[in-house]
């Protein structure tokens, strides 16, 4: 863990915190950070006790302001440009979306361009009210290349997604984007830390495997498969969870109850007509 140079990686019981750690550069993404993000999100997949990953930015000024300008000279060579999009960029997206944990973006300060694309790859996005966001790539005559033009129309109404991309604005407030349908929640700055931690603690208290399966089912459904296929995936996920050893042990207690007994139901805080 200590060999990361551009990010911080810390696990506390059921929560892993991955923090972009280049505050002097407003946490802009260079090639090393991209590689370390890929490694960190692949590493946390193997942490069985972890259910939630918090992705945040160090310092007070930014979550992430996108790609580091030091990258751009190398993009003049076509192959390097393609690699930045199809290797580093695509692999970062896949590492986040495929990490099988609930990934929660914690936004404060500026969240622009590639930084907003990192947030888009997360499962939940919470922001402080003073945050400022936008997709700024079109101002340079290019487009978002790490999933922005693809994930935005899947995350909010298409006419609002178009405005974000076409306008190139970098001053959308968190409240504006919440009203457009982009963010999960927005909190006043003085409450942001406490409210965010409350939400993370609530999710992290759930069984990691159940969170993993919920993420998988909803991801497949959101990918656009037909309803019956999505429902079949859901049924399979629930059956898979039901036959986990700890769930079976709990069900075995129900099976062992004398007929009509309510003691275990009350103990498990289950309604009296719960299916056994």
Image (spheres, rainbow, N blue to C red):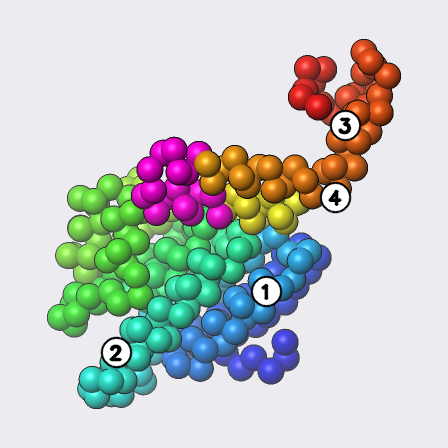
Q: Magenta stretch?
A: 216-231
Q: Which residue is at the far top?
A: 260
Which residue lies under the disc numbered 4? 245
CA distance for labels 3 and 2: 55 Å
Residue at screen point 28% across, 59% down? 148
Q: Is disc 3 surrounded by few (<14), some (14 to 19) or many (20+) residues within 10 Å?
A: few
- Secondary structure of the residue carrying tag 1 is helix
Residue at screen point 53% across, 39% down? 236
Q: Earlier in the sequence, mark 1 or mark 3?
A: 1
CA distance for labels 4 and 1: 23 Å
Judge whether 75 appears above or below 15 on screen: below
Residue 204 is situated, as x and y percent measured from the top left of the image, at: 63, 48
Q: Nearer the viewer, residue 220 or 57?
A: 220
Q: Is residue 192 visible?
A: no
Q: Earlier in the sequence, mark 2 or mark 1?
A: 1
Which residue lies under the disc numbered 3? 268
């Amino acid at each position: 863990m200590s060999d990361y140079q551009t990010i911080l990686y810390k696990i506390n019981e059921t929560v892993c915190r991955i923090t972009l750690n280049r505050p002097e550069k407003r946490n802009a993404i260079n090639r090393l950070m991209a590689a370390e993000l890929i490694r960190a999100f692949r590493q946390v997949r193997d942490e069985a006790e972890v259910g939630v990953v918090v992705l945040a930015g160090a310092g007070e000024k930014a979550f992430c302001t996108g790609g580091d300008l030091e990258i751009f000279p190398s993009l003049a060579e076509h192959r390097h440009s393609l690699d930045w999009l199809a290797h580093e960029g695509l692999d970062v997206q896949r590492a986040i979306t495929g990490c099988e944990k609930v990934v929660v973006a914690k936004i404060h300060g500026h969240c622009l361009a590639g930084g907003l694309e990192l947030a888009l790859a997360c499962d939940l996005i919470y922001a402080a009210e003073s945050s400022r966001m936008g997709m700024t790539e079109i101002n340079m005559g290019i487009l978002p290349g790490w999933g922005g033009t693809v994930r935005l129309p899947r995350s909010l109404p298409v006419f609002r997604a178009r405005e974000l991309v076409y306008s190139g604005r970098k001053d959308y407030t968190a409240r504006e984007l919440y009203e457009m349908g982009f963010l999960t929640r927005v909190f006043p700055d003085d409450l942001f830390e406490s409210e965010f931690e409350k939400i993370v603690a609530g999710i992290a208290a759930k069984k990691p495997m159940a969170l993993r399966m919920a993420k998988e089912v909803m991801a497949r459904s959101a990918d656009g498969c037909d309803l019956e296929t999505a429902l079949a995936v859901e049924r399979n996920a629930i059956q898979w969870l039901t036959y986990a050893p700890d769930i079976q042990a709990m069900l075995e207690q129900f099976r062992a109850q004398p007929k009509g007994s309510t003691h275990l139901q009350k103990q498990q805080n289950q309604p009296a007509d719960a299916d056994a």
